[in-house]
């Protein structure tokens, strides 16, 4: 059986054994494993994260195939988190991958014990649930990294990172800020976002989401189905993974200086 030392030898050569050791101890939870979150999860596991929880109530549907890591013609109809877990364990069988077929809402918040994680990745589509996750995560010691809208984008050179209140040109970030202001509830700490300031329109005809209901009959509700492409959504996901890796490395460098 291939050892972890062999799997991560290239990563260890770049980052060093101290950083890789730290990566193996960090606990990460990814909310939403669609076009962004699925690639983030893979980037994390391929980089040495061993304790990962993935959260999504959706089933794989045909329209996911163009951009979601675990979506293929063979996996349509299966729970996204189950298929993705299998994929991640095929990369590192020693990893602890917890798959939760659940929806994160105000009502289910306590089921996730967010404060027990080192990093929270927000790749949620729903504005209401996304806003609640941001507020909740920012009340804990966990570090939050959030994805803004990855649909209606074509040029990957527009993808960038900024602190939430400094994100410009992204409708989802604007909607979130407006929601916080209307509720008079604000995140208690700053957090970084991956976003693109490119603004395109759908050119194709109208379509209805071919989203099969998840367990319990729950079905996501979207005001509009927007076009999206894998080279953009995957970069969003990998950049989120990169933020985690860089933060772990930064923490190890700080510890070294303090010594």
Image (cartoon, grey):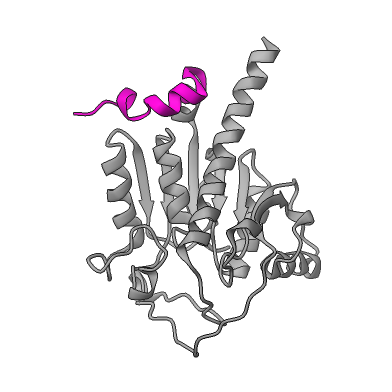
Residue at the far left in the pictured view: 1
**Taking 170 as reference, is 216 left or right?**
left
User: At which x and y percent is residue 62?
Assistant: 33, 74
Span colored in magenta: 1-20
User: At which x and y percent is residue 154?
Assistant: 57, 67
Q: In the rendered image, which quarter contains the C terminus? A: top right
Q: Is residue 186 magenta?
A: no
Q: Residue at x 55, y 82 (%)?
A: 224
Residue placed most toward the observer, 110 or 127:
127
Quarter of the figure with residue 128: bottom right
Q: Is residue 256 above or below residue 143?
A: above
Q: Residue at x 44, y 23 (%)?
A: 12
Residue 237 visible from this viewpoint: yes
Q: Is residue 4 magenta?
A: yes
**Taking 100 as reference, is 163 left or right?**
right
Q: Residue at x 42, y 42 (%)?
A: 52
Residue placed most toward the observer, 179 or 23:
23
Quarter of the figure with residue 129: bottom right
User: At which x and y percent is residue 176?
Assistant: 71, 65
């Amino acid at each position: 059986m291939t050892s972890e030392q062999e799997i991560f030898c290239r990563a260890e050569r770049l980052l060093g054994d101290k950083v890789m050791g730290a990566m193996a101890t960090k606990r990460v939870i990814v909310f939403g494993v669609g076009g962004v979150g699925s690639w983030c999860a893979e980037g994390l596991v391929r980089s040495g994260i061993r304790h990962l929880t993935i959260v999504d109530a959706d089933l794989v549907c045909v329209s996911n195939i163009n951009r979601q890591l675990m979506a293929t013609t063979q996996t349509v109809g299966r729970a996204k988190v189950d298929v993705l877990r299998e994929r991640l364990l095929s990369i590192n069988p020693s990893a602890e991958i917890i798959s939760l077929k659940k929806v994160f809402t105000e009502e289910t918040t306590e089921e996730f014990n967010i404060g027990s994680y080192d990093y929270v990745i927000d790749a949620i589509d729903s504005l209401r649930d996304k806003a609640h996750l941001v507020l909740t995560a920012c009340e804990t010691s966990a570090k939050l990294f959030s994805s803004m809208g990855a649909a209606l984008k074509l040029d990957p050179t527009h993808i960038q990172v900024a602190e939430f209140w400094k994100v410009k040109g992204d409708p989802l970030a604007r909607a979130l800020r407006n929601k916080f202001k209307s509720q008079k509830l604000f995140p208690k700490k700053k957090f970084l976002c991956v976003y693109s300031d490119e603004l395109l329109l759908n050119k194709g005809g109208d379509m209805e989401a071919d989203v099969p209901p998840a367990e319990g009959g729950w079905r996501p509700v979207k005001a509009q189905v927007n076009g999206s492409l894998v080279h953009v959504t995957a970069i969003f996901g990998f950049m989120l993974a990169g933020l985690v890796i860089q933060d772990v490395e930064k923490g190890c460098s700080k510890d070294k200086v303090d010594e």
